Image (cartoon, rainbow, N blue to C red):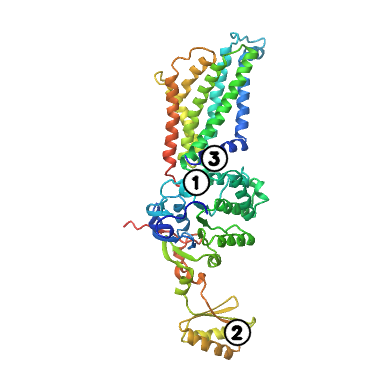
Amino acid sequence: MTGAPLAASGDAAVRTRGLTKRFGSVLALDSLDLDVPRGSVFGLLGPNGAGKTTTIRILTGLARATSGSASVAGVDVSNDRPDLRRRLGYLDQDPRFYGWMKGRELLELVGRLAGLAGPGLRTRVDATLERTGLAEAGSRRIGTYSGGMRQRLGIAQAVLHEPELLILDEPVSSLDPEGRRDLLELIESLAGTATVVVSTHVLADVERICDRVAILDRGRLVTEGPLSELLAAHARPIFRLRPVLGQGDRVAALATQLRAAPWAKSVEVAAGTVRIDVTDADAASRQILPLVVASGVALTSFEQAQPTLEDVFLELVGPASPDELDGRGHLRPREVDRS
Amino acid sequence: MTGFSVLLRKELLEQWRTLRLPVIAAVFVVIGLGSPLLARFTPELLEALGGAQFQIVLPPPTTADAVDQLIKNVSQFGILVAVLLAMGSVATEKERGTAGLILTKPASRGAFLFAKLVAIGGTLAVATFLAAAAAWFYTLILFEALPVGGFAASALLQWLALMVFAAITFLGSTLTRSALAAAGIGVAAFIVIGVLSVFPSIAPYLPIGLGAPARALALGLPPGDVVGPVVANVALIGAMAGLSWLSFRRQEL
């Protein structure tokens, strides 16, 4: 990695304290306190309008906080600090480029701004184009690129100068499965050497690559911590049954019997699976199978499931009520109480 | 001004790649060639158009007519070109999001702005001096030789006048997110300056007022007091650049 190791502010590569951002009467960020440990792959999660992109835009200097502070590598981001940005790589959720420029030229521009020059720059550009699958397209004008190729170029310009801190806002949104796999492998390869902050809705990706996560909801930090601790803290005993297809009536009868059990919190039948949320895992594990046998339902599988990040996310953020959604199904931002 | 030279190189490449520089240069060469031609043949054209029914008598064309024609054409087309060049320079980058791409890199906002302004100045300089060279050459063929140094100094004053309009439009482009709004500010400035130029006490210090010393220099005549007007117009450009930076350094992108 280029540059000196991340400086003070403890082991935090990113730190925010009381970070608040208002757009008129809308409160987009509400006193956000966040620490991103150096070397971590940090997932920033939350529904639309949670404040993820606003946080990232403040960290990258594109937006200014209404109040509070934010620092990267111990340096306040509120001033125009090009030296700080030398240590930062950023991919916008909708990366924009100069259509008249060739992909290689853009990377050379970014490299020169980062202080690279001569053969070293050319070697770095070649390697980055190869790494992001743009080796052949590098000599083409960006205006001819597809959405996925622009996303790859966005990743290339973010990692070209090997930054200490890489901030990726919705990095897989336009990528095909191969591009997504490549990006996840790239992020995994950076773990321990660079700090990566990734904002995404793809929770499976977060589970694969992130070691810590923060969940935001309408500008507030709901929870933050190591992924494993978060999953353990919100672990609930859940059982899943997968009946052989074509037993609709028997499965419905079994679900009714399960709902009547004293340890059953909820029973859902969906997509060929019976999901049983229980209050007493020991009792349930002893009694579920006898009920299945008694009902005559044939199974393909029976498991006591571990909660996924999606389960935790939905539990913490929860499905929005209709009056919380706007016309496009997005959560309404919170209004500032001026009373 | 971190990143200034890198960004200036990008701006100049953009001027070339998007054909702004070659097209503007070609237009100004045509203006340069056409001005002495128009001065030389206008009396004959009018005579031919008048035919037997009307007789239009004009004095014989002179080198002064060629220079007047050049200064008039460069200022008219030049102001239009200056506004067109500057109107989208910052506003379009803010609107398209490319300003955000550059300014999350190790480049200062000052470098981002001034690389653009210098590139606009460079394009206008190339165009103005090409027009002057073409006009000097055709004046030599059609009339007589004029002093090269005086012609170059004249071109410098014309360029300075155009840069004032470019700088005002540039400020508009920095303040807004709309190239059209920026153009409106440039055109409004042209009108205001035109109105102010009726006051004899301030007219020499306005960009339009640079036309008189530019004419004198091109013809090899004493230009009178040129230092005051030059300083005033340079200060105006500096003020526009400073205001642009003050506005842009705190903007959200």
Q: Residues within 10 Å of mark 2 (few under 14, many from 20)?
A: few
The answer to the question of whether label 1 and label 3 lie on touching residues, with beta carbons closer than 8 A, is: no
Is B84 located above or below residue A87 in the figure?
above
Going by the numbered disc 2, the residue's amino acid type is: Asp
Residue B80, image x, y percentages: 54, 29
The answer to whether residue A271 is left or right of residue B168 is: right
Residue marked by disc 1: B106
Is A61 located above or below residue A292 in the figure?
above
As helix, strand or loop, the secondary structure at mark 1 comes to loop
Q: Residues within 10 Å of mark 1 (few under 14, many from 20)?
A: many
Q: Residue at x 51, y 37 (%)?
A: B115
Going by the numbered disc 3, the residue's amino acid type is: Val
Q: Disc 2 to disc 1, how far (Cα)?
A: 66 Å
Going by the numbered disc 1, the residue's amino acid type is: Pro
Label whose residue precedes the other's in the sequence (1 or 3): 3
Q: Nearer the viewer, mark 2 or mark 3?
A: 3
Q: Do circles 1 and 3 both sit on a common chain?
A: yes
Q: Which mark is residue B6?
A: 3
As helix, strand or loop, the secondary structure at mark 3 comes to helix
User: Viewer-proximal residue, A261 or A210?
Assistant: A210
The answer to whether residue A19 is left or right of residue A248 is: left
Report the residue that reaches farthest toward the left.
A339
Image quadrant assignment for residue B246:
top left
Q: Residues within 10 Å of mark 3 (few under 14, many from 20)?
A: many
Residue A47, image x, y percentages: 48, 63
Residue A30, image x, y percentages: 39, 59
Q: Which mark is residue A249?
A: 2
Q: Is residue B88 visible?
A: no
Quarter of the figure that contains the C terminus of chain A: bottom left
Q: Disc 1 to disc 3, how far (Cα)?
A: 11 Å
Q: Chain of mark 3?
A: B
As helix, strand or loop, the secondary structure at mark 2 comes to helix
